[in-house]
Amino acid sequence: MKITSLSKLSVLLLLLQKPCHGYELIKGITEKFGYSVSPGQIYPFLFSLVKAKFVAVQKKGNRDKKIYALTPKGREFANKVVESFDELISLAVSKKVHVCAHCQCKVLGSSYSEKINGKKVYFCCASCAKSFARR
Ligand SMILES: [Zn+2]
């Protein structure tokens, strides 16, 4: 089985933490990874995991809610997938991290930048940029 999308990777990451309802997976992806997925993206993948015996379905509670849990085989598979993505992810993240030239704090994502002597210099905020310029 090939993991070719971020939503599939996210499902595996969440299932590695704990068994989840389909609904919990959808909510968890929004909360933990900051993007939304539709049930149509999640359920077909869950079914293929079940078919491959990577995930077992447990029924819990009186409303017969389905809980998806990784099997030992599935856990091994998920760990391998995460490992292979790990390098890629840290590379992607490190490209987004800037160190504030003034206070040295790390800024992830959009940071404040200014051109100083023709060079782009990054700051965590405008007031750090001002303090830096005053030096
Ligand atoms: Zn700063």
Image (cartoon, helix red, strand yellow):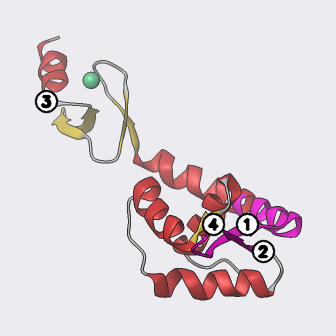
Q: Earlier in the sequence, mark 4 or mark 1?
A: 4
Spot occupied by residue 85 in the image (x, y as percentages of width and height): 66, 61
124 shown above or below 55: above
User: Quick check: marks 3 and 4 in contact, CB under 8 Å?
Assistant: no
**Circle 4 sits on which residue?**
61
- The numbered dot on residue 126 is 3
Dot 2 crowding, Cα within 10 Å, few <14, some 14–19, many 20+: many
- Whole-angstrom CA distance, mark 1 to mark 3, is 47 Å
Label 2 sits on residue: 56
Instruction: Provide the secondary structure element on which disc 3 rests.
Output: helix
Q: Amino acid at mark 1?
A: Ala
Q: Residue at x 31, y 24 (%)?
A: 101
Q: Choose the circle earlier in sequence order: 1 or 3.
A: 1
* Residue at (88, 68) in percent of width and height: 73
**Any magenta on residue 80?**
yes
Span of residues in magenta: 55-82
Q: Quadrant of residue 14?
A: bottom right
- Tell me residue 125's x, y (percent): 19, 30
| Kind of residue sitting beneath label 4 | Gly
Please report whichever mark, 2 or 3, sits nearer to the chain's N-terminal start.
2
| Mark found first going from the N terminus, 4 or 2 | 2
**Upstream in sequence: badge 3 or badge 4:** 4
Q: CA distance from mark 1 to mark 2?
A: 5 Å
Q: Residue 69: which numbered mark, if any?
A: 1
**Is residue 66 found inside the magenta-colored segment of the image?**
yes
Q: CA distance from mark 3 to mark 4?
A: 53 Å
Residue type at mark 3?
A: Ala
Q: Secondary structure at mark 4?
A: loop
